[in-house]
Amino acid sequence: MPLRRALPPLAWSLAWALAAGCSPGPVASRPRPATTSPPSTASAPPATPLADWPVFGHDPGRSALQPGSPPASGLRRAWSVPVPGAVYAQPVVADGKVVVATETDQVLAFDAATGRLAWSRSLGQPVPGSSLPCGDIDPSGITSTPAVDTSSGTVWVVAFVQPHTHLLVGLDLSSGAVLSRRVADPTGSDPVVQQQRGALALDSRQVLIPFGGLYGDCGDYHGFVVAMPETGPGPQTVFQVPSRRQGGIWAPGGATLTSSGDLLVATGNGSSTSAFDGGNAVYRLTVGLLPADYFAPANFAALSASDTDLGSDGPSLVAGGSMVFQVGKEGVGYLLSAAHLGGVGGQLYSARVCQGAYGANAVDASGQLVLVPCQDGLYAVRIGPGPSFRVAWHHPQLAPGPPVLAGGVVWVLDPQAGRLVGLDPATGQVRFSQQVGPATRFSAPAAAGGELLVAAGGRLSAFEGI
C-alpha cells in the first residue's frame, strides 16, 4: 500500500515546526547564527570509478565532478553518431557503454571507445503534446536521466507512453533486454498533468522517481517522490508534497543523496499564498520517504504567489556534506545545516547570487566552490567562514545548462548558441570552445574515461582530451 501523509498542510507545518523547536509561522528573515553542535556525519558519497558516469551528476550526491581525471589537454572529436529524437536526459556511462534516452521513448547504448551502436530499445509510443493541457515538450517520451545500477548491470528509465502512462523499465546493460516493466504513476495521481523530469536515483535497492507538473502549471498536479524496489514487483512507497496542488519536484538533477542514504529534494511553488504548505522548500526524506526535516525561505508565500520556485535548481552538498546550498528562480542562495535544515527562515546564511538559477550545480573536490547555471550566465560561488559565501566570478556570455567538472575544467553546454564551452574554475576564463549544434534546455554533458559525451544537434558526440 502506498505510504501517504494523512496530515493536512497546516498540521504538517505544525508537526515539523514543533519537531524543529520553532514556530510554525515564518520567523525573522535574518540569517541564523552558526550552531556549535558537531557537524553532520553526512559527507559526499564515495566516488564512482573514473570510467563511469552512471547517474545524473556522476554520483548520488550529484557533485557533477569526475575525480582523478588528468588535466584537459584539448577538445578533439573522437566520434559522433545520429540520435533519433530530442534528448533532455544527460548521457550516462557504465561498463564501457554510453546510454542515451530520447523523447521518442527509445534507449540506445553505444560503445564508449568507438561510438558503435551496441543496442537500441523502443519502450512504447511517446505522448503527443497536443493531447496534454499544457507543456513544452512534443512528443513527450523519456525526459529524465536514467540511472545505471552497476552492481546488477541494470539501466533504469522512466518512459511516458500512450495513453498517458509513466512506466519504470529495467533494461539489461549488456544487451538492452527488458528485465522489468511497471507503472510508476503514484496511485490516485493524474498522469496527464504530471511530468517526470527529475533524474532517477538509486538508494537501498530502490529506484527513486521525482514528479512535478508540466510547463504552464496546468491541472491538479502534485510534487511526488516514488520509490520502487529494484528486485521486482512490490508496493510503491510515496512521498507527496502536502500542498493542495503543485509543489512540483522537477529540477533535472532529481534527488540528492547523503552518505546516510537520506534524500534532499527541493520543491516549486505551492498553492497557498499564506500558510506554509510545503511549496518552495528543501526536504530531507528518510530511505522510507518519511519527512525528517525541512527548510523554507521566510518569503515562501510571496514566492508561491509569483511562481518563483525555490526548486528550479537542486540541493548541493558542500563543505564535506555538512552544509546544503540551495538557490532558485529568485536568485537568492541559502546555506543550510545538513544536520538541521532550519524550518521556515532558518538558514545559516543567505545572499543574492544571480537573476535566477535553473538546472543543477557542480561542486568541486574541496566542497567549497559551487558552479551555478543562471539566466544571466554561469556563476562560481565560494563558500567561506561564518559560514558565508560570495560570488567568485561570473561569465555572462553564456546561457548555460548544468555544468560538470572534469580534467580541471568547468564544462557547460550553451543550448541556444550550440556551443560546448570549457572554463577555468579559478577565473571563469574560456579555455575551450566547440560548436556542437543546438541542444534542449537543461542539457548537460557527461565525463567518463577521458571523454566528454554531449547530446546536441541531433547527435551524440564524444570529445577526447580531458
Image (cartoon, helix red, strand yellow):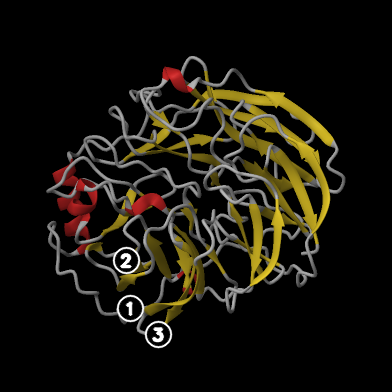
Q: Residue at x 63, y 49 (%)?
A: 418
Q: Which mark is residue 37?
A: 1
Q: Which residue is mark 2?
A: 340
Looking at the image, residue 355 lies above or below residue 181: below
Q: Which mark is residue 385?
A: 3
Name the N-terminal-most of marks 3 and 1. 1
Left or right, residue 91 beside residue 440: right
Q: Position of residue 320 (x, y in %)?
A: 50, 73
Give, as a three-letter code, the residue at label 3: Pro
Q: Residue at x 37, y 27 (%)?
A: 134
Q: Is residue 154 visible?
A: no
Q: Is residue 118 visible?
A: yes
Q: Position of residue 30 (x, y in %)?
A: 20, 74
Q: Residue at x 69, y 37 (%)?
A: 458
Disc 3 is placed on an element classified as loop
Quarter of the image with the N terminus is top left
Q: CA distance from mark 2 to mark 1?
A: 10 Å
Q: CA distance from mark 3 to mark 1?
A: 16 Å
The crowd level at tag 2 (other Cα within 10 Å; few <14, some 14-19, many 20+) is some
Disc 1 is placed on an element classified as loop
Residue 235 location, quadrant: top left
Q: Nearer the viewer, mark 2 or mark 3?
A: 3
Disc 2 is placed on an element classified as loop
Looking at the image, residue 369 lies above or below residue 356: below
